[in-house]
Amino acid sequence: MLAAERRAIPRPGEVGAPDVAVPDADMAVRTGEICTMSGMAANPWCPTRRREWVAADTEMLPCSWHHLTDDGLLTIWPAEYRQWAFDHELDRPVPEVRESAGVRDVRDVRHVRADSLRISNPPDGATYLIDPTLRREFQTLALRAVRSAPGLVEWIVDGRALGNIPSEQATTWPLVPGRHKFVARDADGRVAEATIVVR
Ligand SMILES: [Zn+2]
């Protein structure tokens, strides 16, 4: 991807390159301010933001990750990033000095969780191509399930058990040509499925 990007788009800072790479002239684009964490349109509380090119007909939803509460900036992490945020100690509110001393009932939205299990990778219906120029041991698929609460997830590929993996940790599966069905099952009996094709 890096090689393709270098070939297609001059990098910012290279001779003749603008601050932000300009897309092809025939694409209908506009610039918009995005939250660099969520990639959604920046709201007034997003801590890091940048201007990016977006397709002109894209309706940008405001960032749903960043919220201002009486405790300061609160980030609501989507389930698949929660473990990462916890590991990096990013899951705590950033304190902010505020004038208002009024006590308000701030609901801790971090703990609002719906019971769910889903497969975040591979996406259902995806097609993967085996690259004949790459060594096969590098052509693996990361299997990831997202569970509302941490727990073990059993993976079953084409009816064969792969083993139990802690949720929000990935396991790998070597790409094999054909159609494959992935089933993730948690201890509460919830089941998620995804079917892919490898060519
Ligand atoms: Zn944001």
Image: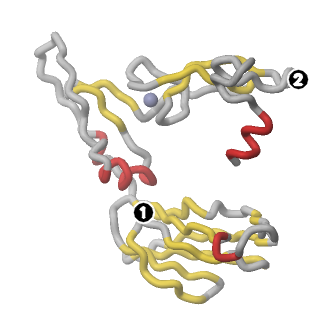
Q: Residues within 10 Å of mark 2 (few under 14, many from 20)?
A: few
Q: Of residues 187 and 63, which is closer to you in this image? A: 63
Q: Which residue is mark 1?
A: 168
Q: Give x and y (percent) for residue 20.
A: 65, 21
Q: Of residues 199 and 104, which is closer to you in this image? A: 199
Q: Is residue 153 visible?
A: yes
**Amino acid at circle 2:** Asp
Q: Quadrant of residue 75?
A: top left
On the picture, is 183 further left or further right than 115? right
> Residue shown at 61%/26% (left/top)?
60
Are discs 1 and 2 less than 8 Å apart at CB? Answer: no
Number of numbered discs on residues: 2
Q: Give x and y (percent) for residue 152.
A: 37, 74
Q: Of residues 172 and 64, which is closer to you in this image? A: 172
Q: Give x and y (percent) for residue 7.
A: 79, 39
On the picture, is 41 further left or further right than 152? right
On the picture, is 131 further left or further right than 83? right
Q: Which mark identifies residue 26? A: 2
Is 11 placed above or below 127 here? above
Residue found farthest to the bottom: 160
Residue found farthest to the front: 15
**Amino acid at circle 1:** Glu
Is 121 placed above or below 76 here? below
| Element type where label 1 sits in the image | loop
Q: Is residue 56 visible?
A: no
Q: Give x and y (percent) for residue 18.
A: 69, 17
> Residue shown at 70%/76% (left/top)?
136
Residue found farthest to the right: 26
